[in-house]
Amino acid sequence: MSNIYKTSTFLLFSAFSLSVIAEDAKEINFAQLPAAVQKSVLNEVAKNNITKVELIHEEEATKYEIESKTNGIAKDVTLASNGSIIEIEQGSSLSQLSPSALLAIKHDYPNLKIDEIESVQSFYTAVEGTVKGKRVAFKVLATGDIEGDENSKEESKD
């Protein structure tokens, strides 16, 4: 085995290991969920339709992903420890898209062979403000993650 191949293989496994460390998922029982998470998820899916419950540690955040299936349709709900919904993913179909969306897909991807369609709802809090005279806008997820920091150079009029 050449040194270049060994080095490439080592780098590939090192990169994979780092991505695994970034998110640690462990399957748990529904009863192990915090009460607030149990209550929130049962507003979205019936308990007997739940197929998998995961506890996920990602960086400094803890979240829970609940997978379910109802009448053959998959639905995944991701929640923060306090029961706030972060995201809902649900199986969908072309028939559920608007005519405009269908036209756009046909136009941009004329030979598309669709493997899966999913409806995704993401929940966050939008925050806008001023820091040292500069406008900022960002999204805060229930996990405490901050996304989309949109700094602008406008001076504050406050």
Image (cartoon, rainbow, N blue to C red):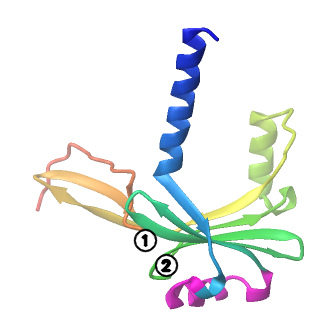
Q: Nearer the viewer, residue 41 or 25?
A: 25
Q: Quadrant of the N terminus?
A: top right
The reply to whether residue 35 is in sight is: yes
Q: Amino acid at mark 1?
A: Ala
Q: Is residue 132 left or right of residue 6?
A: left
Residue 24's spot in the image, x, y percent? 52, 58
Q: Amino acid at mark 2?
A: Ser
Dominant SS type (magenta): helix
Does 30 sit above or below residue 78? below
Q: Residues within 10 Å of mark 2 (few under 14, many from 20)?
A: some
Query: How many circles with numbers are drawn on the protein?
Result: 2
* Residue at (77% x, 42% y) in the render: 105
Determine contact: label 2, label 1, CB under 8 Å. yes
**Mark 2 sits on what residue?**
84
Residue 137's spot in the image, x, y percent? 31, 56
**Mark 1 sits on what residue?**
142
SS type, badge 1 = loop
* Residue at (32% x, 65% y) in the render: 127
The reply to whether residue 124 is in sight is: no
* Residue at (22% x, 53% y) in the render: 135
Q: Quadrant of the C terminus?
A: bottom left
Residue 157's spot in the image, x, y percent? 12, 57
Q: Residues within 10 Å of mark 1 (few under 14, many from 20)?
A: many
| Magenta-colored span | 32-49
Tell me where residue 3 sits by quadrant: top right
SS type, badge 2 = loop
Q: Label 2 to label 1, Cα distance in Å?
A: 6 Å
Q: Nearer the viewer, residue 118 or 134?
A: 118
